Amino acid sequence: MISDQLNNTLIDQIVKELIGQGTEGLRHVLELLLNASMKIEREQFLGARAHERSEERKGYANGYKPKEIQTRMGALELAIPQVRGLGFYPQSIEKGSRSERALKLAIAQMYLEGVSTRKVQDITEQLCGYEVSSTQVSRLTQELDEEFEKFRNRPIGEVCYLVVDALYLKVRHNGSVVDMAVLLAYGVNPEGKREILGASTSLSEAEVHWRDFFQNLQSRGMRGLRLIVSDDHAGMRNARMAVFPSVPWQRCQFHLAQNAQAYAPRKSMRGEIAETIREIFNSPTLAMALEMKRLAIEKYQKRASEFAKWLEGNIDEGLTVYQFPQEHRKKIRTSNGMERLNKEVKRRTRVAVLFPNKESALRLVTGVVIEIHEEWITGKQYLDMNPLLNKKLKNE
């Protein structure tokens, strides 16, 4: 079996580099780790160590190719393992680097287009560790755009649950700074894994943007959809009904509870109203939830008539979850999973402050979500889908 741990010789090298060498030592440590990781990756790809006789061997090593890459620590001199005729390329130096490369580009574009400040120049130097030329920006932009476009338009397949939301980033447009809508979607597949399905930018959340977004998912082969989960975004409702007219919709219970408090006649009643909504949503059955809704409407008919009216017209949109397995309800009754994704995207894009155009914003967002997508796909199962799939088989 090929070990996935560094050997003692490598550990001794790392210790020697760290002792008394400061940042320069760390750079050499990073080189050692990356080179060792790539070597191990080649061994795993081939199914055998160097010079090892094995029936599982798939091919043969073919030396190393020198490559210099730029990082925050400075230039790294790497030895890229080669494989004879099998198209091998190690992922060790790619994983975790996409969003950083995209971030460098976004900031570099600001610098090159004359919209930067001293602060942005300092950030560029800190992140890149070297000056970014216009030629490098052009070459890397083309490379990233091809990679990211392929990800955004890849075939999808069967998706059981779809969660969608929008966030906003600031971009320059026609000489002004505007808020640009970024539409994001992730799905839960029949294996119970989450995967990022779509990312799109537009200067508004208008229905046409949502419609194009949904149609893109559909055209890429998304099928088997049982439920859409989201907040009640402007333009999204009509687009959803036009593209997925027969798919049930679960309106986010968390946002519904927040919206309800706006109908409190007095500030002191907000907590009481929030508790009423929580009691309805926490009911063990749909029948009990509807009964609690009826009682709440009667209770607030006079004390908070606007809230009672809102309750009657909106609360059912948050009860669709009762149609689905109880084991799944906690994770599909809100869009909180998407909220966490949005926060991570905002955290990772915050350093850019202001994007020079929507293309640079989409580039960085895509870099971030690809990394998250890969973590989800290779990580643990999000939901056990057997209760849902077995229910489908029984109905058939």
Image (cartoon, rainbow, N blue to C red):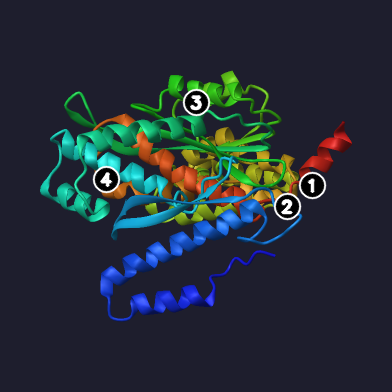
Callout 2 touching callout 1 (CB < 8 Å): yes
Which dot marks residue 387? Answer: 1
- Observer-side mark, 3 or 1, equals 3
Front one among 177 and 89: 89
Q: Secondary structure at mark 2?
A: helix
In primary-sequence order, the first of circles 2 and 1 is 2
Alpha-carbon span between mark 3 and mark 4: 25 Å
Of residues 376 and 253, the one drawn nearer to the viewer in this rendering: 376
| Disc sitting over residue 70 in the figure | none
Left or right for 275, reference 290: left
Looking at the rendered structure, the kind of residue marked 2 is Glu
Indicate the quadrant where residue 129 lies.
Answer: bottom left
> Could you tell me how far apart the alpha carbons at marks 4 and 1 are, in whole angstroms?
44 Å
Which mark sits nearer the N-terminus, 2 or 3? Answer: 3
Decide which of 395, 288 is in the foreground and name it. 395
Query: Residue type at mark 3?
Result: Phe
Residue 352, numbered circle: 4
Q: Name the residue type under label 1.
A: Pro
Q: Which residue is mark 3?
A: 213
Q: Position of residue 175 (x, y in %)?
A: 16, 26
Regarding mark 1 in the picture, which secondary structure is present there? helix
Q: Nearer the viewer, mark 2 or mark 3?
A: 3
Secondary structure of the residue carrying tag 4 is helix
Label whose residue precedes the other's in the sequence (2 or 4): 2
Q: Name the secondary structure under disc 3.
A: helix
Q: Position of residue 117 (x, y in %)?
A: 12, 45
Q: Residue at x 58, y 44 (%)?
A: 84
Picture coordinates of residue 183, whole percent (x, y): 45, 33
> Vertical placement of 351 versus 158: above or below?
below
Q: Nearer the viewer, mark 4 or mark 1?
A: 4
Binning the other alpha carbons within 10 Å of mark 2 as few (below 14), some (14 to 19) or many (20 upward) gives few
